[in-house]
Image (cartoon, rainbow, N blue to C red):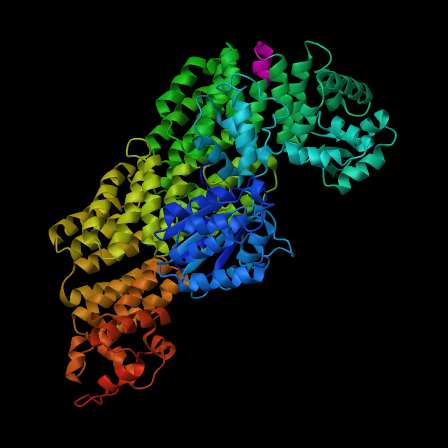
Amino acid sequence: MPLIGRSKELDRILSVIRGPKDTALAVIGRKGTGKTALLSAIRMLSDYRTVFLSATAAESDWPLSGLTALLNDMDDPVLNRIADELLHDNTGAMSVPAVSSMLLNGLHQRSSSRTVVVLDDVDQLDPSSQAVIGFVARRLVGTDTVLFVSMREDLPESPFSGLAALRLGPLGYSDTVRMLESLPAKRTTTAAAHAVAAAAGGNPLAAVDLYTRLLERHTAGKYALPVPLPSGGSFDAECASVVGGLTPGARNVLDLLALSFRSDISTIEKIDRDVWTSVDELLAAGLVKRTGPHLGIGDQLLRGYVFAAMTPAVRTANHRALAEAASDTDPYARRWHMSFTALERQTPFQLLRHAVDLVRNGEVSFAVEYIERALTINPWEAETAARLTSVAEMLFNRGEFVYARRYLEWAQRVTRNPALILRLTGLSFEIQFAQGAAVRSSMVLRLVKEFGQHDPAYAASLLSIGALYYAERWELEEASELLRHGKEFRGSASAHCLGIAERAELLIESIGGGTAGLGRRQEQTGAARAAGLLMHGRALTYAEHYEGAHETFALLRSSDEPGHVNWQETAAFMAVDNAIRAGNVRAAVRLIDELELSEPELKYHRGTRHLFRVWRAHSLGDDAQARTYAAEALRYAGADSHPAITAQLAACQGQFALLRGDLAESVAQLSRAAEIGMRFGNPTLLRCEADLVEVLVRLGRHQEATQALLRLESRSVGLRSPWLMMAVARSRALLADGEQSLQLFSQALDSRNGHTLERARTLACYAERLHAFGRLRDARDALLRAKVMFDEAGADAWTQHVDALLLDERMEPARPQGNPAMLLLADHERSLAKMVARGMRNKEIAATLYVSVRTVEVRLTAIYRKLGVESRAQLTALAAGKGSAAAEPYVLPIL
């Protein structure tokens, strides 16, 4: 079984293995949660010798059989003698306490290196072995042994009760889908994986069982999914045990409930007058859930088992009884149950009509069962395609892309109606728009030209939504072209469509640098208002009105309208970009973390999500994770498929390479971003050219830097961007020489243009230039003010950079030499050593230097290593030795 979605659990296990303590960890989880798969990964991830023992329930009646098997697997000379004594103890004289003491002594005496012992299903071992191992597990210190045990429950009376525990919860929905899609299968569909993930409740074994059985009957999405899903068998014994303990009346009610997703209690009451007694029993056992007047089996594995346990005759009889009983209480249920007992042509179409109502009410899982049943009865008629189209559109508006795509593709196989072909193909494009996939504008135009006359209202809507998509990709020519073609259908366009087209024009204008249309307001309702708010907020972001954009996105995201889901999710992504552009790193990181709590791989704006992950990792100073995310991002965005994402990724990597001093990498990435960015026109979109000027200056390539600045200035004409004014001013100051450079830096900082992060970056560059002129105190003062600004923005990577500069000898005034041994140290290291000699503690030193305590600890460790000392006392003796200077310490100014 692929190990997916358990990264946090693996990190916990590895921290125990690599930690300094010899200890034990209990991995606890119900059947099928993946304990064995998790523990099996230890052998591949650990460099230490690993002994893995899986318990055998068949030997659980033989005293100490499990312990003997473990000792044999460990194959250590000392432990082998204990195993021999156990084997030759024919009289049973060796008690559990005696064996426990013997084993513990043996572990202390053995001479082998650290060993990792893994016992899977330890609660299946014989009781004597459990008692011995449980005793030893609490006394591993000094044995050079790490022990992992897995069990289903942490019972108070268990020998392993009280051990440090790692509890395996259910897999997330998206992780379950990823796991299933990674399994080898010749024929499958995404919808099948999603149906199984919904039914399995996060249990990996149950998901694999259901998926395997489903694939036996489901080929490439051409057949309807069975309802309920067939049980895989691994949990049949547990289900049989649960059901076997019910009274006959409760069992009969459970049979009735298994026939549908939910049932009205009054309907069942017509069949069984004592239903309430049975319902109380089922509710008390936790086998059913009640929502108002309806009951349903919550565990779909149990439902599948109960359904399969009934004979076909019993199922048919129960369906017939329920259909008759539901005639005047639950019309949905009546048509559902009749579909199993009577062949009527209208049945599948009525089921689809009921499904539309259920989707509208937010009951998607319930609706899917009705749809799949309708497709089972009559999958190929033209009327089926028309109703499936409506269902698919409603599912899309609810954000249910997987099922929307399944049913639109089914309808495409059925219909030859040109109006439906337009709607279905257009809906496929809209799903790709929302997911961030690449769609060529020529494909959209070709579709509209060929089929648009058959449904001009939908053609106009598709063109306006497509214009938003291409505008957001910064492909303004394509967006404008779609709007021009949309005017041909203006007479048939709805007010909603016209509003979206107007907002698309506003977005195109703002991306190009215009702000004239920001004051225009639209009085709209429903989905049109949601789209209008989204585009207005996006236009505010590009116009650098960040507070207004933030409020607009927050207003949209707080809406509880179910039909606004796609606009709300898109607003979440746009809110992140707004915070990044505003320089509010802390807020952007928080918003990205909120995005990660949603289904990260399945739905919206995949390329943008990967870009945000890269940016977040870099901003927090985690370059290793950033590299991992960058490799993933490149799979989703190439220069041909999504130039905007490709350019933004290069700009991000180039900026942070500049920050960490990797100038070769920085100039390569920034040059690539600038080259792609030339097609976008507005230089404030990418924001990479000022960084390119800076890295070229640092490389001494002043002529190229001058050319880059001239290009930036020429492209800035007519743009009213505070950020751009600050970036250009900083670039001019970097390129200038002598006192002119300092004057330009002062002017840039006095202008108050740009946001906090950009001002802090300008201050940091100013500090370096001040240092070059020998104005060390002014340089440090500028750095400290920059650090305060970086802290305010939450820019951890920049704060760490300033910390490094504050401790770097380039920012320290020259110090008198002392003890000759101190010559081994750099200037900033001698300064630290003398602070220690004066009796200052690490926290006081950190406060004096405006750095973290961790930074001080790292520097002191390096000093100890250079001087060959092992304590603060020895360092103090060296620092205060003969010839040491008695100069007053340099005290940093307090801001």
Residue 243 on image: x %, y %? 73, 34
Whether residue 16 is visible, yes or no, is no
Q: Is residue 640 above or below residue 805?
A: above
The answer to if 94 sits in the magenta stretch is: no
Q: Nearer the viewer, residue 485 or 365?
A: 365
Residue 315 on image: x %, y %? 73, 19
Q: Nearer the viewer, residue 648 or 313?
A: 313
Q: Is residue 769 left or right of residue 576?
A: left
Chain part drawn in magenta: 379-387
The answer to if 386 sits in the magenta stretch is: yes
Residue beneath the point at 54% across and 42% down = 56
Q: Is residue 199 left or right of residue 613?
A: right
Residue 386 on image: x %, y %? 58, 15
Residue beneath the point at 72% across and 41% down = 286
Residue 789 on image: x %, y %? 37, 64
Q: Quadrant of residue 563?
A: top right
